[in-house]
Amino acid sequence: MTERPATPKYKNRVAKQAERPRVGAPRAIADLMPDIGRAAFRKFGFVQSSIVTRWAEIVGSHYAEISVPESIRFPVGQKAGGTLQLTVMSGHAPMIQHMLPDIVERVNRFFGYGAVSKVAMRQGDVKPVRAERRPPPRNLKPIPVELGDSLRDIGDPELRAVLESLAQGLANSAGLPKIN
């Protein structure tokens, strides 16, 4: 008969896991959300989620009010020559039909390559998405005097504005930037 060890193997494993120090710092939810959203968008056929969020920029506000992208389906093993599925508001399909070459060109320009070659439409309810307008953040602290005086000597107004913005950002920061 063989002898059994005094402690079972799984207890040793648990003890080793408990002794390990924690690696990495806590992460903000905002850092995790793009990954979660990307997985959901890919499940429904979107390679880039930005085509949904920036649809008004891609096709223009008029067409964004009456159409919304539903998915992009690519041929097996390829990431080009796909079919863009659009949902179009009832009664506007003939107008969108005439604009399809322009929409395909704009979407491909947005992607930077020939991602879409065909568009399939279906009629349905399209809820117009209004972009939320937020006022720009207020600069809480003024530019430090020593930085402001040295910036006044710069002749190029565009360069001066960019450097003032950089100085303002440094003045409003809470310390050295954190590099992940």
Image (tube, rainbow, N blue to C red):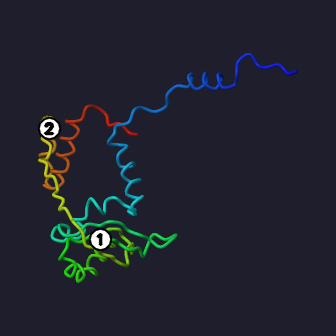
For the residue pair 74 and 30, the one nearer the viewer reads as 74
- The alpha-carbon separation of the residues under discs 2 and 1 comes to 49 Å
Q: Residue 157: image x %, image y %?
A: 13, 55
Residue at image location 23% in from the left, 72% down from the top: 88
Tell me the amino acid under the disc marked 1. Answer: Leu
On residue 114, the disc is: none
Left or right relative to 26: residue 167: left
For the residue pair 105 and 161, the one nearer the viewer reads as 105
For the residue pair 102 and 143, the one nearer the viewer reads as 102
Q: Tell us which disc is closer to us: 2 or 1.
A: 1
Left or right relative to 141: residue 1: right
> Which quarter of the picture shows residue 68?
bottom left
On residue 86, the disc is: 1
- On the image, numbered disc 2 is attached to which residue? 143
Residue at image location 42% in from the left, 58% down from the top: 43
For mark 1, does the 10 Å Cα neighbourhood hold few (<14), some (14 to 19), or many (20 or more) residues? some
Q: Residue 55: image x %, image y %?
A: 25, 65
In which quadrant is the C terminus drawn? Answer: top left
Secondary structure of the residue carrying tag 2 is loop
